[in-house]
Image (cartoon, rainbow, N blue to C red):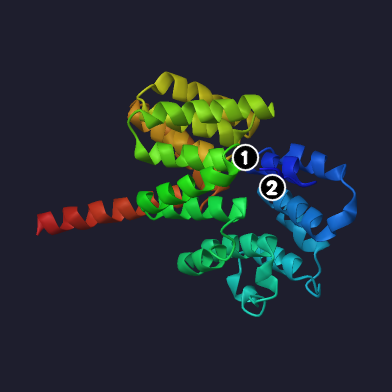
């Protein structure tokens, strides 16, 4: 796995685990030998922390750097700005490709994002993002095949372990326990407490029907980030499963305030609409 390790390896792992302030701290100690990679990771951490205005302020619209242009597009959630950037030269860069893929995903252009990611089959972030997309498409079979391939050349990499744990959660059964222990080991090995990891631990416990432990992990996630949208969404689910209607309503309202376009809310609205349609049809 030595060929995967570079100056940015530790900072990237922190970014993947949701430890954004720690990633920024790690990046601040690195020399600017690869300024584009350094700035791209810094700006991605800032975007994850909600510092969109800072990113747009520091990357001028006139920049000639394609990766930074792609970051502006990501910050603006505007995939149309990518149209002139998706050249063969720019797509040779895995960093540019990942940022472009994230922007396309935000715009609902999943197939185009997959096409770009497929250009870098031995880049960890490209393959891991591809696994996440496959799982979102309910294509567990494709995710399993890709995870098995990655295991052959990057088994010990934290991001590869994350992809395997995500896949285990979808596989179910005894794999729920395996996913839980992978997330726990990652948290212990990295020595960081992040909402992302606590949330993953909670999801594993919810699948196992261990709601008290799931709630405890979600409360820890809230302490790490009181407005983390995924934590709030999972608190809505957990309190629904435990029939805690008052808490469910409170977290649902908070989620709508901090992330009104969250996929969970979108799915909930669509389910409500289908229910209303069915009810209307039955009353005729």
* Residue under label 1: 157
Q: Residue at x 58, y 30 (%)?
A: 221
Q: Residue furthest top?
A: 212
Q: Is residue 192 visible?
A: no
Q: Residue at x 43, y 19 (%)?
A: 212
The residue nearer to you, when weighing 115 against 278, is: 115
Q: Is residue 228 visible?
A: yes
Q: CA distance from mark 1 to mark 2?
A: 9 Å
Tell me the crowding category of disc 2: few under 14, some 14 to 19, or many 20 or more residues within 10 angstroms, Cα based: few
**Quarter of the rendering containing residue 57:** bottom right
Q: Residue furthest bottom?
A: 84
Quick one: SS at disc 1?
loop
Q: Residue at x 43, y 36 (%)?
A: 236
In the displayed structure, 24 sits above or below 221; it is below
* Residue under label 2: 4
The N terminus is located in which quarter?
Answer: top right
Q: For this view, does 197 lie left or right of residue 249?
A: right
Q: For this view, does 136 lie left or right of residue 69?
A: left
Counting residues from the start of the chain, the first of labels 1 and 2 encountered is 2
Q: Position of residue 48 (x, y in %)?
A: 66, 48
Q: Position of residue 227 (x, y in %)?
A: 60, 39
Callout count = 2
Disc 1 vs disc 2: Cβ atoms closer than 8 Å? yes
The C terminus is located in which quarter?
Answer: bottom left
In the displayed structure, 122 sits above or below 199; it is below
Q: Position of residue 220 (x, y in %)?
A: 58, 25
Quick one: SS at disc 2?
helix
Q: Residue at x 40, y 35 (%)?
A: 237
The residue nearer to you, when weighing 159 against 187, is: 159
């Amino acid at each position: 796995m030595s060929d995967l390790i570079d100056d940015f390896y530790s900072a990237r792992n922190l970014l993947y685990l949701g430890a954004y302030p720690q990633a920024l701290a790690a990046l601040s100690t690195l020399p600017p030998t690869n300024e584009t990679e350094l700035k791209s990771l810094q700006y991605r951490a800032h975007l994850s922390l909600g510092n969109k205005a800072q990113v747009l302020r520091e990357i001028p619209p006139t920049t000639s750097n394609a990766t930074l242009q792609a970051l502006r597009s990501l910050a603006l959630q505007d995939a149309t700005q990518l149209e002139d950037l998706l050249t063969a030269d720019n797509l040779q860069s895995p960093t540019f490709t990942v940022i472009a893929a994230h922007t396309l995903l935000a715009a609902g252009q999943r197939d185009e994002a997959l096409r770009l990611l497929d250009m870098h089959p031995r880049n960890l972030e490209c393959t891991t993002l591809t696994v996440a997309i496959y799982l979102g498409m309910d294509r567990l079979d494709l995710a399993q095949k890709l995870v098995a391939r990655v295991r052959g050349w990057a088994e010990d990499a934290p991001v590869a372990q994350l992809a395997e744990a995500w896949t285990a959660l979808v596989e179910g059964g005894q794999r729920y326990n395996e996913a839980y222990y992978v997330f726990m080991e990652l948290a212990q090995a990295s020595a960081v407490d992040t909402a992302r990891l606590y949330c993953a631990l909670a999801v594993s416990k919810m699948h196992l029907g261990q709601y008290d432990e799931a709630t405890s992990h979600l409360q820890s996630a809230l302490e790490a980030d009181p407005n983390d949208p995924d934590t709030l969404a999972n608190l809505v689910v957990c309190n629904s499963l435990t029939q805690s209607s008052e808490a469910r309503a409170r977290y649902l309202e908070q989620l709508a305030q901090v992330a009104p376009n969250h996929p969970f809310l979108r799915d909930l609205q669509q389910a409500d609409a289908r229910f209303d349609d069915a009810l209307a049809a039955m009353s005729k």
